[in-house]
């Protein structure tokens, strides 16, 4: 790590930035163990937790977890083969975008790559249920994409589909029908590929996007998570010779994700209800939907169902609870925690704040007050990435550390965020992005109006798209913000499109605009071309191995700010990509941001 601030971590080992997490759990086929990704020893890798006893009972009887060695690079996901003999692991070399799939035995033996396209990236969809065959997606260095069947034992490969922006979703057990997703962000469509039948589109002609789907074991029914033809994402079933049927839909919530048992009889639904998660169980034979007990934390980020449909394993987290693994009995409704760090004391509990933007659109966000601070306080507005992500009451160490230092945090969902319907998500597309920039100023104005924020001590910060939006807000509304923190944000759409991965550029056109056809619009939206209006000191954070938003974006920001005499500090992580994955680096990041914002906001205006 190259670190230019001279900051040294001063965060105690029992505070939130140091807390380890457990994510993307997967049950063994016999449900006697669960594999998951954890950074408990400093870097995310595979761990296996043996299980024992009744899922509705206590932890007694579970053995000690052990790590599975998959090499020095961070791991991001794990999936257990139907026979139980192998694991598929998504490995992120350098923490960047060139993901690879490796396979290994649960005891750590026979580690070898299954999909590692040179200069490209791989993703796994699922095991097919036929032997040790895995369905994976591969993207080449030039952006071409394929769906590939890979035998994890022999290494034999078979390309079963290819096309631009193609991602495999599922395959029937006999390998005769394939479900694939095609298209850019916000306009994705599912297709069924069958022998002699070519690619048949599902939900053709309906506006919206279908981002996730699976097939029944025999391949005759596709189950789709989609907002095509509706505003809120729902679960639809499309049978081979029938019209789409709505299986689960809510007007007050969006379907966030779902998981189906191997026999196709049970589906667990995870709803996004105002940012918090609720669970339901769906019987595909009867169509009956019943609620499941509330998860043990506010947000469920991952769910998988056992082969027989009796159990579900989820990853859940909350503001004071790092992501942990919970085993749920889908028959009794009982659940127990099986892996994860203990709950931490919360410095600030999130409060939901709803208000109107200047054009009347309803916005919302999560407010974290600094304890013991009377009257208008220093505040940091934190903008999420995406923009199709969402600020939710998740485990975010920075949102506890800043209030502990006397700085409040507001994490808004400006237009373009997910979780509020398709119309809201598309309300910042192309030229509408100027309104999203104004939303940031309206967030600051609302904090001041409510008497929460000192108008002379407000900072703006964000990561990825949130970093871009931070820069755009600082140059569009320079009188509002006293400081800014740009974490791997875009500064110039022209250089972003020229230097990002080709498959990322192709998928972004529907969201941002075309680099040629919309050149003038993209120039007007690029904050770098308005840096003559920048007045707020900047902290720029980036990963040297980031190939999503390459570090050249940060270099341009630093050079342009300093050329205009604006103070600009830099924090560069040599061993990270677009995300900060290693515990030591996360600690340094939180410490640096708290220290830097403290110096700029805690002094009187």
Image (spheres, rainbow, N blue to C red):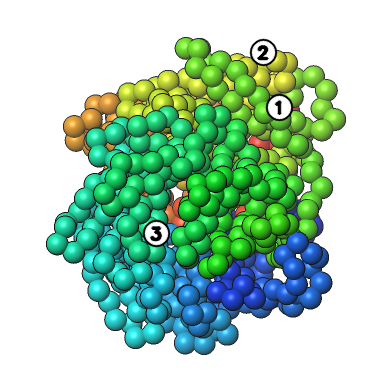
* Mark earlier in primary sequence (1, 3): 3
Query: Residues under labels 1 and 3: Cα distance?
Result: 53 Å
Q: For the N terminus, give its image quadrant.
A: bottom right
Bin the neighbour count of mark 2 within 10 Å (Cα to Cα): few under 14, some 14-19, many 20 and up. Answer: few
Q: Given contact means CB atoms under 8 Å apart, are the residues at marks 1 and 3 in contact?
A: no
Q: Are marks 2 and 3 in contact (CB under 8 Å)?
A: no
Task: Compute the Cα span from label 1 to label 2.
Answer: 14 Å
Is 462 on the left-hand or right-hand side of 352?
left
Which residue is denoted by mark 1 in the rendering? 378
Whether residue 214 is visible to the viewer of this picture, yes or no, is yes
| Mark 3 surroundings within 10 Å by alpha-carbon count, few (fewer than 14), some (14 through 19), many (20 or more) | many
**Which mark lies nearer to you, 1 or 2?**
2
Q: Residue at x 79, y 68 (%)?
A: 59
**Residue 423, percent across and down?**
41, 26
Name the quadrant containing residue 346. top right
- Residue corresponding to mark 3: 216
- Circles 1 and 2: CB atoms closer than 8 Å: no
Q: Please tell me which residue lies in front, 415 or 548.
A: 415
Provide the secondary structure element on which disc 1 rests: strand
Q: Residue at x 35, y 32 (%)?
A: 229
Looking at the image, is mark 1 or mark 2 earlier in the sequence?
1
User: In the drawing, what numbered circle is on residue 449?
Assistant: 2
| Helix, strand or loop status at disc 3 | loop
Mark 2 or mark 3, earlier in chain:
3
Q: In this view, does 597 lie above or below 164?
A: above
Q: Quadrant of residue 324?
A: bottom right
Q: Which sits in the foreground, 323 or 495?
A: 323
């Amino acid at each position: 790590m190259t670190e230019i601030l001279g900051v040294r971590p001063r965060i105690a080992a029992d505070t939130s930035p140091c807390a380890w997490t457990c994510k993307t759990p997967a049950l063994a086929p016999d449900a006697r163990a669960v594999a998951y990704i954890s950074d408990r020893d400093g870097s995310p890798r595979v761990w296996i937790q043996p299980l024992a006893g009744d899922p509705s009972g206590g932890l007694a009887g579970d053995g000690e977890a052990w790590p599975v060695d998959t090499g020095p690079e961070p791991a991001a996901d794990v999936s257990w083969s139907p026979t139980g003999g192998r694991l598929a692991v998504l490995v992120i070399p350098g923490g960047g975008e060139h993901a690879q799939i490796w396979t290994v035995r649960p005891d750590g033996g026979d580690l070898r790559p299954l999909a590692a396209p040179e200069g490209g990236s791989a993703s796994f969809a699922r095991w097919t249920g036929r032997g040790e065959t895995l369905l994976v997606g591969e993207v080449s260095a030039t952006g071409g994409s394929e769906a590939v069947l890979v035998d994890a034992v022999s290494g034999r490969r078979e390309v079963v589909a290819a096309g631009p922006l193609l991602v495999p979703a599922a395959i029937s057990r006999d390998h005769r029908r394939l479900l694939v997703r095609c298209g850019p962000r916000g306009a994705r469509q599912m297709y069924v590929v069958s022998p002699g039948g070519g690619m048949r589109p599902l939900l053709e002609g309906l506006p919206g996007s279908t981002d996730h789907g699976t097939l029944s074991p025999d391949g005759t029914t596709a189950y789709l998570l989609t907002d095509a033809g509706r505003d809120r994402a729902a679960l639809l079933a499309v049978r081979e010779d029938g019209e789409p049927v709505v299986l689960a839909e809510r007007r007050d919530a969006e379907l966030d994700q779902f998981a189906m048992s191997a026999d196709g009889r049970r589906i667990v639904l995870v709803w996004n209800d105002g940012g918090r998660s609720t669970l339901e169980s769906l019987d595909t034979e009867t169509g009956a939907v019943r609620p499941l007990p509330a998860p043990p934390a506010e947000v469920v980020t991952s769910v998988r169902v056992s082969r027989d449909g009796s159990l579900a394993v989820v990853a859940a987290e909350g503001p004071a609870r790092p992501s942990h693994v919970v085993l749920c009995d889908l028959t009794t409704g009982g659940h127990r925690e099986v892996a994860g760090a203990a709950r931490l004391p919360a410095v600030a509990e999130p409060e939901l704040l709803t208000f109107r933007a200047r054009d009347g659109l309803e916005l919302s966000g999560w407010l974290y007050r600094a304890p013991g601070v009377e009257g208008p306080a220093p505040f940091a507005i934190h903008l999420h990435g995406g923009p199709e992500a969402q600020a939710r009451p998740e485990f975010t160490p920075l949102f506890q550390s800043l209030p502990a230092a006397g700085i409040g945090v507001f994490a808004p969902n400006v237009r373009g965020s997910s979780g509020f319907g398709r119309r809201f998500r598309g309300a910042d597309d192309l030229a509408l992005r100027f309104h999203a920039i104004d939303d940031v100023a309206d967030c600051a104005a609302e904090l001041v109006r409510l008497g929460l924020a000192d108008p002379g001590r407000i900072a703006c910060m964000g990561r990825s798209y949130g970093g871009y939006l931070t820069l755009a807000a600082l140059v569009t509304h320079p009188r509002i913000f006293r400081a800014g923190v740009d974490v791997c944000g875009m500064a110039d759409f022209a250089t972003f499109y020229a230097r990002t991965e080709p498959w990322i550029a192709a998928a972004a056109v529907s969201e941002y605009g075309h680099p040629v056809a919309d050149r003038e619009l993209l120039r007007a939206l690029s904050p770098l071309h308005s840096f003559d209006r920048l007045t707020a000191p900047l902290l720029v954070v980036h990963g040297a191995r980031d190939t999503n938003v390459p570090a050249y974006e940060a270099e341009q920001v630093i050079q342009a700010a300093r050329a205009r005499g604006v103070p600009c500090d830099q924090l560069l992580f040599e061993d990270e990509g677009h995300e900060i994955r290693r515990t030591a680096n996360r600690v340094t990041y939180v410490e640096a941001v708290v220290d830097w914002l403290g110096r700029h906001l805690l002094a009187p205006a």
